[in-house]
Amino acid sequence: MYGPGKSTAIMLIGILILTSGCVSEAIYHPTHEIRHIPAHAGLAYEDVTLETSDAVRLSAWWVPAATPRGAVLFCHGNAGNIGDRLDTLLIINSLGLDVLIFDYRGYGSSDGSPTEQGTYLDAEAAWNYLVRQKKIAPGQIIVWGRSLGGAVAARTAAEYPAGLVIVESGFTSLEALVHDHIGWVPSWILSDYAYDTLYYLENISAPVLVIHSPDDEIVPFRHGKELYGSIKGPKAFVEIHGSHNRGFIDSLTVYASSINDFIKVYFREKEVIPE
């Protein structure tokens, strides 16, 4: 399996030290060494450099499908880097989708240091690359986020006209997640870190697929149900089984088939952006 190690993937460790005042260090757990590349999983790919609107250079991979029916903008979680997501790239590729996966600022080979607004600008740069450089119509883009990336994906889809949205193992807001684990905390501690997925989902018109596991030990299952309940437009909910970091692997058959079914039902026919 190509995936983040347990020590880098568990958000709870960070949450439990939020009261120390080192909020950024508690939320973000980047690693810089890229241990795996798509070629290790037999996937063709291109190294891509993105530049954000505030002039931060980001590292990304473009992984094309043989006969693509759309493209995924993938927002990963709070730990590791893109080199820890080869399992996900294989699944997306098997679904017949191109994918652009990027590292947030401060992760992998990307410059800078992560912040909430910074991660949003990073996803914006990835969106712009797909639309402006790859000439992919917005309606053919699936914005897909896992864990912390679910909030980033939801915010991106609230700002840009994505074709579909997938929020996997996501939380309603960072504050709600912290309260679930350690109870009340002073409001000033999280004043700069909202990651309010619930708010962003309420402002999305594209069909949304929510995926969550009742076995998730990091983000309680009710977060997924509340996110699903907040969506006003077309939506679907898929219950998988397994831990926060392994649920998509342990439930691979139902996971992949449910995503495929959702795409078949809601995806628009291919569009072309005029030159």
Image (tube, rainbow, N blue to C red):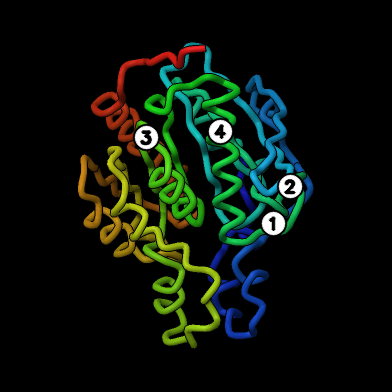
User: Who comes first in sequence, dot 3 or dot 4?
Assistant: 4
Sort mark 1 into few (<14), some (14-19) or many (20+) by Cα contacts within 10 Å. many
Return the residue at label 4. Answer: 128
Return the residue at label 1. Answer: 30
Residue 217 shown left or right of residue 23 in the figure: left
Marks 4 and 3: in contact by CB < 8 Å? no
Return the residue at label 3. Answer: 253
Which of the two residues, 123 or 273, is positioned nearer the viewer here?
A: 273
User: Who comes first in sequence, dot 4 or dot 2?
Assistant: 2
Instruction: Give the image location of residue 39, x and y in percent.
Output: 70, 25
SS at badge 1:
strand
Distance between the alpha carbons at the discs numbered 3 and 1: 30 Å
170 w.r.t. 253: above or below? below
Marks 1 and 3: in contact by CB < 8 Å? no
Residue 231 in sight from this viewpoint? yes
Which of the two residues, 22 or 255, is positioned nearer the viewer here?
A: 22
Instruction: Give the image location of residue 36, x and y in percent.
Output: 72, 37
* Residue shown at the point (33%, 31%) measured from the top left: 257
| Mark 3: amino acid | Thr
| Mark 2: amino acid | Gly
223 w.r.t. 68: above or below? below
**Which callout, 3 or 2, points to the residue nearer the camera?**
2
**Which callout, 3 or 4, points to the residue nearer the camera?**
4
Return the residue at label 2. Answer: 108
Quadrant the N terminus occupies: top right
Sort mark 3 into few (<14), some (14-19) or many (20+) by Cα contacts within 10 Å. few
Distance between the alpha carbons at the discs numbered 3 and 4: 32 Å
User: Who comes first in sequence, dot 2 or dot 1?
Assistant: 1
Instruction: Give the image location of residue 174, x and y in percent.
Output: 46, 68
Marks 4 and 1: in contact by CB < 8 Å? no
| Mark 1: amino acid | Pro
